[in-house]
Image: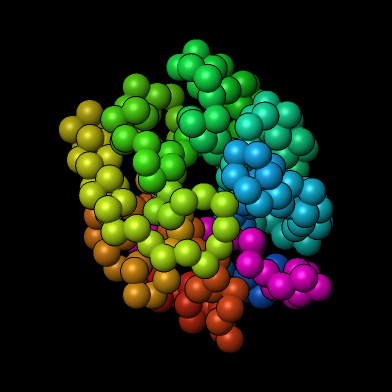
Amino acid sequence: MVEVATSILSIKEGKEADSFLKLEIAKTDYFHIDVMDGKFVEKNTYQKMLENVSYIKRISNLPLDVHLMVEDIKTAVNDFLAVAPNIITFHIEACNNKEEIYKMIKYIKQNSCRVGIAVKPNTKIEEVYEFLPYVHMCLIMTVEPGKGGQTLLKDMLKKIDTLKQYRQKQKISFDIQADGGINLKTAPEVKRVGTDILVAGTAIVMANDFKDIIDELKS
């Protein structure tokens, strides 16, 4: 069974506390925290996400899945390490070279946190291969990062399938996460090609019953 990480990006202003509690009751596996700096992507959610994760830590024991869409990775890592996340994922496109990617992987691990790497739709999957033995997760963006409610790019299904086959062939252990445009209609195909963790936001938080949607996504 796949796991579900619920993106809190689309939660309505003023409804945060109620929504976080309902998501825990609905048994989401992770709170997915979309951290944007207004530079790497157009939208800026940085301060809002810092406030939200601080509140979540006070009311919930569910793991935090932090997705950094930022240029200054190290500063963001330091800011979000303060809330003891389960995993921090950063984009390889935000790094200048391979040495910087390895340095960030090592730095996050040294701070007792699991680490993931993420790729945008236009990045070839082969670019992540050499880093996979050293990370816990690879996040495939199935939309252009930066905003919620987009339509899943079907070409990304092939990318996920290629990554799954590479994992099997090389006998490497890491999770495959897919993020963007995932709902009850698109989830079956995304799961079929080998995804372990589905990130869904709008499909869950805009529903009348969070648990119904989460259960269906998992099944």
At x 34%, y 69%, the residue is 186
Please determine whether, in this image, residue 212 is positioned above or below residue 9.
Answer: below
Q: Nearer the viewer, residue 4 or 204?
A: 204
Quadrant assignment for the C terminus: bottom left
At x 23%, y 35%, the residue is 166
Quadrant assignment for the N terminus: bottom left
Across and down, in percent, residue 24 comes to 64, 68
Across and down, in percent, residue 94 comes to 55, 30
Please determine whether, in this image, residue 110 is positioned above or below residue 208.
Answer: above
Q: Nearer the viewer, residue 75 or 108?
A: 75
Q: Which residues are magenta?
A: 1-19
| Residue 112 left/right relative to 195 | right
Across and down, in percent, residue 79 comes to 76, 36
| Residue 9 left/right relative to 156 | right
At x 46%, y 39%, the residue is 118
Q: Is residue 3 magenta?
A: yes
Q: How is the image coloured?
A: rainbow
Q: Can residue 168 be seen at all in this image of the molecule?
A: yes
At x 38%, y 62%, the residue is 152
How many labels were placed on the picture?
0
Q: Can residue 66 be seen at all in this image of the molecule?
A: no
Across and down, in percent, residue 117 comes to 47, 35
Q: Nearer the viewer, residue 93 or 18?
A: 93
Please determine whether, in this image, residue 175 is positioned above or below residue 181.
Answer: above
Q: Is residue 193 magenta?
A: no
Q: Toward which corner of the image does residue 192 lie, by quadrant? A: bottom left
